[in-house]
Image (cartoon, helix red, strand yellow):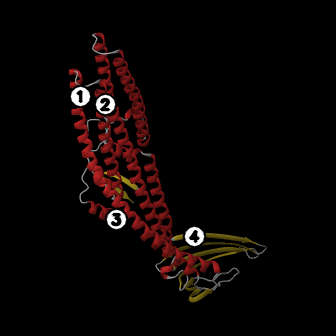
Amino acid sequence: MLLFVPVVIAFFTFTIYAEGLSENDVLLKALSNNTDIRIHNLESQTDSLKLREVSSKRLPQVSLRGSGSLDDSISSANASATVSQTIPGGGTVFGTVEQSGGIQRSTSRSTSDRRYVAGVEQPLLRNAWSNSPVELGIQITTINNELLSIGRRQRILSTLSDVRNLYWNAFERKELQRIQENQVTLTEEFMKSERERFVIGEASALDTLSAALQYANAKRNMLRIENESQSSLYRLAAALGVDASEVTISQQQDVLIPDIGDPDELIDKALKYDPQVKIFERMQELTSLRIKQRRNDLLPELNLRASYDYNPQPSQIPPLQPSGSGASIGFVLNYSLPSVSTRSQIEQQELSLKSEELSFEQHRLEQRYFLKELRDKWQQDKEMLHYSNLSVDLAYKQYEATKRGYELGTEDRLSLIKAQNDLVAAEVTAIQAIIDLKRLQIVIEEITGTLFDRFGVYINES
């Protein structure tokens, strides 16, 4: 069963404040509310039940049986109870109690007798020792559960990464909306200024029309971005399983981009964590067990059976059973010529082992190049973010200088409009640069398996 335990829950409690949700709030809410994660939790419980079902074959088994007969001379009834227990090596120990009774109609004489049998049956070839069907079944189910568990953990990481991306998409849209609001304010002020200048004869009708056009374009873009922003909130709310009215994005937070350290260490960490390594190892074990099962089917069935029979009193009604006790040992041999299909299945499984090895080697090669590409992109995007922030600073200074020059008559209207557009473009590029780094950070934390540690979440699978 999957259990999500926030280790530092006191700091990550999910509460909707006036300033909105943080990334921590969103992630912890997703762990408890996201539909995909809840389904994974149910699947984990199902796997536990399957293993319990297979393991129950190790427990003692009880069987009851009864019968009766009626003819012209005798009425009789029989009942028996048997307790059996599998033992290591594929054998079975058993004990049986039989009770019978009847009435002989001609003499109206009744009788009853009881019989006790205890013994052991041990396979010597097929299904013997390490080929015990119960133990092989438990091993195969355990490995299958481990494979499913690894897959579920990766799907949970992927789901949380999707939720985090939705969060930062919504954050990006809110930031773009804020930038566009500033643009609307600037163009509105410029439009009013041009109209005032037109009244006193310092601006032409064309100047006022151009300013009005800039304002109309800014308002149009504002409506488009508002719609995109609202849509991003709807998608995030759906992923969190909450009403859209409960989802607001905190705009007063510092967007922190942690340093990944030595880029080469990132590659080593990701290769060590790579879940495909565990999957490959478990698949090799699973295929080997299936080959073992098929080879076991080729063996003859030879069982040793030893029993002790105790009957304290003789039966008075046919079939007559003498009193006393006795021990017996016997062998049972059963052998069928192996079919072509069984040998073919073994060869297919052996080829599957080699195929898995080749696929894994190719995966490791592709994974190494992917990580190198990721490392290079991280370094490049951090440098791009530096220059994007520098561009915002320079664009703002350029706009202020152009604005003063326009007011003094040394700069024309087109230069001012261009400076405004340059400032907006620089701010948009800077926001996109930092969000691109956040998305890259999400990928890195997923492929290195460090997401849970960073957010203080522990997954216990039992």
> Mark number for residue 402?
1
Label 1 CA crowd tier, 10 Å (few <14, some 14–19, many 20+): many
Mark nearest the camera among 1 and 3 is: 1
Q: Secondary structure at mark 2?
A: helix
- Residue position for label 4: 63
The quadrant of the rendering that contains the C terminus is bottom left
Q: Is the residue 91 above or below the residue 166 in the image? A: below
- Counting residues from the start of the chain, the first of labels 3 and 2 encountered is 3
Disc 1 and disc 2 in contact, CB within 8 angstroms: yes
| Camera-nearest residue between 460 and 353 | 353
Q: Picture coordinates of residue 378 (x, y %)? A: 30, 53
Give the label, 1 or 4, closer to the camera: 1
Looking at marks 4 and 3 on the same chain, the residue that comes earlier in the sequence is marked by 4
Inter-mark Cα distance, 4 to 2: 90 Å
Q: Dot 2: within a 10 Å radius of its alpha carbon, few (fewer than 14), some, or many (20 or more) residues?
A: few
Vertical relation: 268 (above or below) 113 = above
Q: Is residue 374 visible in this depiction of the protein? A: yes
Label 3, on which residue?
271
Quick one: label 1 or label 3, which is nearer the N terminus?
3
Kindly identify the amino acid type of the residue bearing the numbered disc 1.
Thr
Distance in Å between CA atoms under marks 4 and 3: 53 Å
State the image coordinates of residue 102 (x, y, percent, origin top left): 68, 74
Q: Identify which amino acid the numbered label 3 is placed on.
A: Leu
Q: Secondary structure at mark 3?
A: helix
* Image label count: 4
Q: CA distance from mark 1 to mark 2?
A: 9 Å
